[in-house]
Image (spheres, coloured by chain):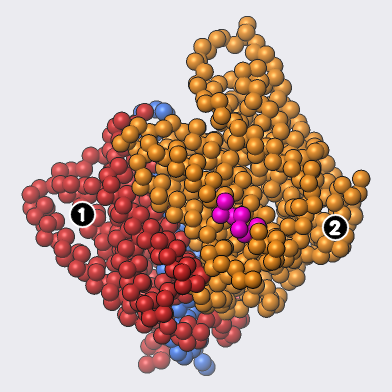
Amino acid sequence: MLYASFLFDLILSIALVVLGMITLQQKTPREAVVQLMIFGLLVALSWIRIDAPDLALTEAAIGSGVTGALLLAALRRLGLNQRFPDPAPAAIRLPVTLGCAALGFLLSVILIQSWDEPAGLTDIVYQNIEFSGSANPVTAVILNFRAFDTLLEIGVLLVAALSVYTLSGPAGGTPVRPPGPIFNLYLRWMTPVFWLVTLYMVWIGGRAPGGAFQAGALLSGLGALTLLGPSPWPMRLRRRVVRWGLTLGFGLFLFAAAWLWRYGNLLTYPQNHAKTWILIIEIACTLSIGISLTVMFAGCAGWLHEDPEAAA
Amino acid sequence: MTLPPGALLYALAGVWITVIGLRGVLAEEDWFRKIVGANVMGSGVFLLLVALARRAPDGPPDPVPHGMILTGLVVAVSATALMLALLGFLNDRENGEDDT
Amino acid sequence: MIAPPWLLSLPVIFPLILGVFTLLIPAHTLKQAGKTGAVATAVTTLPCLQWVWQAGPLHQTLGGWGAPLGIDLYLDGLSCLFLLFAALTGLGISFYATEYFPRSAEGHRSRTDLFWPLWFVTWGGINSLFLTLDLFNIYVTLELISIAGTGLILIAGTRGAIRAALQYQMQALIAGLVYLLGVGLVYNALGTLDLQLIAAELTPSPMILTGLALMVTGLIIKAALFPVHFWLPPAHADAPAPVSAVLSGLVVTVAYVIVFRLWFAGFHTIAPNLVPRLMGVLGAVGIVWGGILALRQERLKRVLAYSTVSQVGYLFLVFSLTLDSPAAEGLVWAGTVYMAVAHGLAKSAAFLAAGCLQKTEGSDTLTALRGAALRQPAAVIVLALASINLIGLPPSTGFIGKWMLLKASFYTRQWGIAFVILGGGLLAAAYLFRVFEVLMNPPDRAAAPDTAKPPLPLSRGILFPAMLLALATLIPVLYITAPEELLRIGAPVSFSRFITPGAAQ
């Protein structure tokens, strides 16, 4: 049993390295993207093996799913069938390869040598988890103990979406193929389903793997469908709903932070109400994460519109 | 003979994926490939950190690195999206109208 | 005396709230909001100054958990000085930007309107980086300001800017991952992310040393030390002028300040001597290399961007200079801080002036700017005041800083560094006088055909903030004791042999 488990880990870790290498050796961008998505799924599998189901879910949704969708959207715009240009001259490649290999050896030796001296915050997290308002330790870390990081991270998503908006084309880039009535019907039926699953994922994140990021990634799937539908509203920053939706998570988080100054330092939740605060913040963030990722998708595909009046 | 723990294998895999990705970014000329390389490198760093969180043989893994990686994943996807949008926009520009 | 709970987080949270606010309000009100918000943001740093002046360093825990579980903010004289520096620079840049970017018509929203949310978020991130003690929080915040920085460059909308932004974002992502890898190793060796807790437990084990080396490498890329400066000149030169000022004056400085803080928090006690020597050598080479390339540029903003590469080099001499002689530590330490502040203020002012010249003359190529001193005297005066700092001439802060470094290099007998400091000043003089020669020369009417560009009308007040920043670099000469006293509060180095330039003369 022990051997079987060891063998599985050995094969998977070797497969990961090989797949990573193959991904970067592909001749065409399309093959590289497909390889990268498979690679992402295998990384998620390995994270289940090392007891990180939260992360595995996120990696599958964001690392493999969303990133893959972004790459494919960009690829469609860049031209699907192009090949990579010739690689850099050996004079550059060789020293870079040697340097990277040296770094790899150094890190490997250090890891093997100092593997048996674990240090970390596991104990202290579990000692405080009952006061955190979440039974899921990862949610407790990101939304209570280290909520300031997450606040700034939601800021990263907002800022990235805004930066993508600076690239709006005057004519809205590549035109989207008009969808048929069946698609519209599908969209109308799928919308509530997406919302339901999203909200469930946020709610379950308080106890089990799940949470705002996974749910937000899911919501961006609905966003991507909306972009193809009859009313692709995320394409225009001028639309008030876009601006409010993008800023809801960050804005509410900031508001909570400032409001909570009443109870102590920044982001100190009042006793016994931490759970409510976390849930409200998570729902707002989920919404904004979904819209931000949708905007990024539209930006990669080249679908963002600029106001014709402001094009000058 | 005692077998090395599975987490160590994944940590070593993480190290090598990191350097493969880094090499991809530094040694390739094509921007699309560089972006793919950066994503591979990111996965390697995250894999290494997740494996390090599992170093203690018993008990639950350390949730703090897990939180860090969750953040890192979002940063990586944001940066990737921005770079892809940039690349596409640049491509449109170079095939289409001249500089404004 | 108990500090109010908002004291340290207000300068971080307030600009972030403004970032959201400026995205939601109607675009035609942005000008007013930008000015008011900038003043208010600058004011939020004053309680910090008051506190640190009266009560000394301050430690605050976010979320009420405290390190190692939570994230801590820490204020000392150094971080307070940099907060004030960011406040002043940010104020100048904001007022300038209200005039520089066209106002959107009512009900419309253009690309340039995104300057405000992106800039206020950047400002909040910069303030956070001066205060935070948490290594991972530094990573998130650095990525926040890098992505915002990419968006800010993109506001220019030209093809050059887009290409520069792509390179900028790629270096930021890779540098961030290298830094994160280092943080991961340090965390796994010591079990905490808090800088003060880490500093208390540092041992030269392979894992910690490698982690620290990776962290410093990532930060050095972001601070654009030679030879990893390649991304800086296009990004800083092709961005809109207020953005160039933000990136060159503030963002590069903040990346450097993190290296500086980490180093003197304890890294210097365990790092092998090779590391500081190497950083010193790279700094010295960067001074010369940046200077030589600045001399060969044909565009004013390019000259200024390469000048940043050169000036960043000076800031890295400190690691080598504090190596042998602890007695000179305080001198070098403070001198470097003065250099950083002087460069940040002067470079921002210079980019703002360059932006005016670029707008009014239609281009920032040196040929187009021939004789601009006659047409735009105010911009050229600002540029001249900034140049005094960059060259290191008295009576500027740049002079004080350079003088202290020079003194320390004599004191520690590092003649090579002394030579580079002097030579770098000459190089700066050369590349800047080359610009001034062009600006002062009357246009050659016979050779240059009359381009008949109608001068772009700029509001009269646009250069006032730039002038203010340039003049601010002269304050320490009049009143050196105040910044010096501030710096001493909670300083990690001994000031036993600290001698002010005034006292030595």
Judge whether residue A114 can be spotted in this image. yes
The answer to whether residue A148 is above or below residue A138 is above
Q: Quadrant of the C terminus of chain C?
A: top right
The answer to whether residue A50 is above or below residue C103 is below
Q: Residues within 10 Å of mark 2 (few under 14, many from 20)?
A: some
Q: Amino acid at mark 2?
A: Phe
In the image: residue C137, left or right of residue C269: left
Judging depth in this view, the residue of C488 and C372 nearest the camera is: C488
Residue that badge 2 annotates = C498
Q: Residues within 10 Å of mark 1 (few under 14, many from 20)?
A: some
Quarter of the view holding residue C434: top right
Residue that badge 1 annotates = A225
Q: Main secondary structure of the magenta part?
A: helix
Q: Which chain is red?
A: A
Q: Is residue A60 magenta?
A: no
Q: Position of residue B71 (x, y in %)?
A: 44, 66
Q: Position of residue A262 (x, y in %)?
A: 46, 69
The colour applied to the residues of chain C in this rendering is orange
Q: Quadrant of the N terminus of chain C?
A: bottom right
Mark 2 falls on what kind of element?
Answer: loop
Residue range corresponding to the magenta coloring: C43-49
Judge whether residue C181 can be spotted in this image. no
Mark 1 falls on what kind of element?
Answer: helix
In the image: residue A30, left or right of residue C271: left
Q: Position of residue C167 (x, y in %)?
A: 50, 46
Q: Amino acid at mark 1?
A: Leu
Judging depth in this view, the residue of C111 and C48 nearest the camera is: C48
Judging depth in this view, the residue of C352 and B72 nearest the camera is: C352
